Amino acid sequence: MRAAHLPYAALCLALVTRALAVPPPLPAEHMRVEPLPPRSPHWVYVYDEAFYNEIDARVHLFDGDSYRRLGQIGIGFLPSVAISPDGATTAVATTYFARGSRGARTDVVEFTDNATLANSGEIVLPSKRAETTPTLFGVAYSADGHFLYASYVTPAASFGVLDPAHKTVLGEIDTAGCVLVIPSGPNRVSSICESGRLLTVALDAQGHESSRAMSEAFFNADQDPVFVQGIPTTKGYAFLSFLGEVHEVDFSGAQPAFAPPWSLVSAAEKEHWRPGAEQVGAIHRALGRLYVPMHQGGEGTHKDGGTEIWVFDLASHRRLARWPMQAHKLSRVLAVQVSQDGAPLLFAATNHADLAVFDALTGELRHVEQHLGQTPWMLFNP
Amino acid sequence: MRSLDQLFEHSARSLARRTSRRSVLASLGQLLTGAALLPLLPLDRGSRAHAAQARPGADSPENCGYWKHCAIDGFLCACCGGSSTSCPPGTAVSPITWIGTCHNPGDGRDYIISYNDCCGKTSCGNCECNRNEREKPMYRPSRNNDLNWCMANADSNYHCSLSVILGVAEK
């Protein structure tokens, strides 16, 4: 080969090499609906009230291990959410307007299959549903899942008894001004009264009232009202008061039983530090640990959110830890939830709509998911 | 004005206990609406001037810190096309409501404030105001701002909230 031919040979070699290096074309793609992976105890349902456009609230399903969103449930206008005792179904009591933001009102309980996040039926309600900020007691299942109860406020107070298996309304029970539906056992519903008492209605097999009884008063609405966001315990619910008293109510018997209240705050802290949030506490039931968003403030700050999360031992009533949110540059905590497994995660939703994931045993911050929705005001363990 | 305070609380409690038909509610609501809209006091009209300022002052109804908003949790109608006593165009006043007691630093008096909602359009989304002085949970509905007080309206969507003086609160 003459030297003058060398550049041509090099060019040919380069072209061949390049042709050989081009990858094969991409295969045709196929669309599908992503299946949910098997349920994890580290999943959390994030209730986004969508306060700035309230007809479009939603639940985001978030994985506290992979830090990924797994799916969403549309939940309408000022809804209440309950998960069935077997975990298979999410029930959402909500309201729709015929023309989007206006028009005829339809109240309905919608069911979602938690294995697929697909709608699995509905029950149309009378237009009486209690439209309020999130609470565990707007809609609630009986312990065996046989009944579903829906709180009504027109503002006359009552509740509906529903049959989730047959998707029917069984009846309505007047509650004499007492509000919300706190379920216990297979057939009991308690409602909170302005007098500080609990009205408990027992139902027969058809879902009709068989008896009712009024408890003694366990709080004083004038001096120190309790938040209506009850926190599930092993035998019932704990209710926190505005000033930080803990009222543990045992709902395992025919009538509620009240343990002596105890305080989250010392005498020096009282009326300076107090609980405040939309969801004011979470309990790891096996460990007996209570997590509460706490802040410094006076009367009227009960929705202000926590600048710290305080951790308590339910058996000894001893405070175990204070976890300041400022240390992680987090804004005020408006909702907390803790997973119920042996390596628990503590979830905290903030005023800036961030979701923080902590090690619930040590307080170590694992992750901050920024802007998870608009106004995440309640967290559920699915 | 403990007596007026008690009157409204008593009314709400009695209503909740005795009422189950919306028609009765509507009738009572009309009465309440009339009562709420009657006392348009000079203090309130004066605040309209401040609403035109670029940055609302402490005595502007567009400012969450405005004294009348002491128990509100929602969007200020003054920022949504209305004022502290008028609903934005195309919405409707809620006939039923919750009340608060607020201190007016201008005259040193406490006033009973009615927080009627404006209804029929989705959330205004402007001037969110979350103050809860003496606000109580929903087992005391006459003092609760978490309930949707558009609940008895024909179009029950929540848009924004008013702060309407009902009268002076007696000590």
Image (tube, coloured by chain):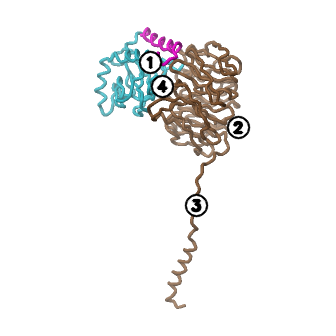
Q: Distance between the residues labelled 2 and 1?
A: 53 Å
| Quadrant into which the C terminus of chain A falls | top right
Camera-nearest residue between B46 and B94: B94
Can you identify the residue that label 3 sits on?
Answer: A28
Residue drawn where x is 47% and y is 24% of the image: B151
Point out which mark residue A342 bears: 2
Q: Position of residue A373 (x, y in %)?
A: 51, 39
For the residues labelled 4 and 3, say whether their Cβ atoms are less than 8 Å apart.
no
Secondary structure under the numbered disc 3 in the rendered image: loop
Residue at the top extreme of this rendering = B3
Image height of A147 relative to A74, above or below: above
Residue A109, visible in the rendered structure: yes
Can you tell which chain is drawn cyan? B
Q: Where is residue A309 in the image (x, y as percent from the top left)?
A: 58, 32
Label 2: chain?
A
User: Mark 2 is on which residue type?
Assistant: Gly
For the residues labelled 2 and 4, say whether their Cβ atoms are less than 8 Å apart.
no
Q: Mark 4 or 1 closer to N-term?
A: 1
Camera-nearest residue between A378 and B64: A378
Can you identify the residue that label 1 sits on?
Answer: B26
For the residues labelled 1 and 3, say whether their Cβ atoms are less than 8 Å apart.
no
User: Mark 4 is on which residue type?
Assistant: Asn
User: Mark 3 is on which residue type?
Assistant: Ala
Can you tell which chain is drawn brown? A
Q: How far apart are marks 3 and 2 (CA)?
A: 44 Å
Q: What stretch is highlighted in magenta?
A: B1-26
Q: Nearer the viewer, mark 4 or mark 3?
A: 3
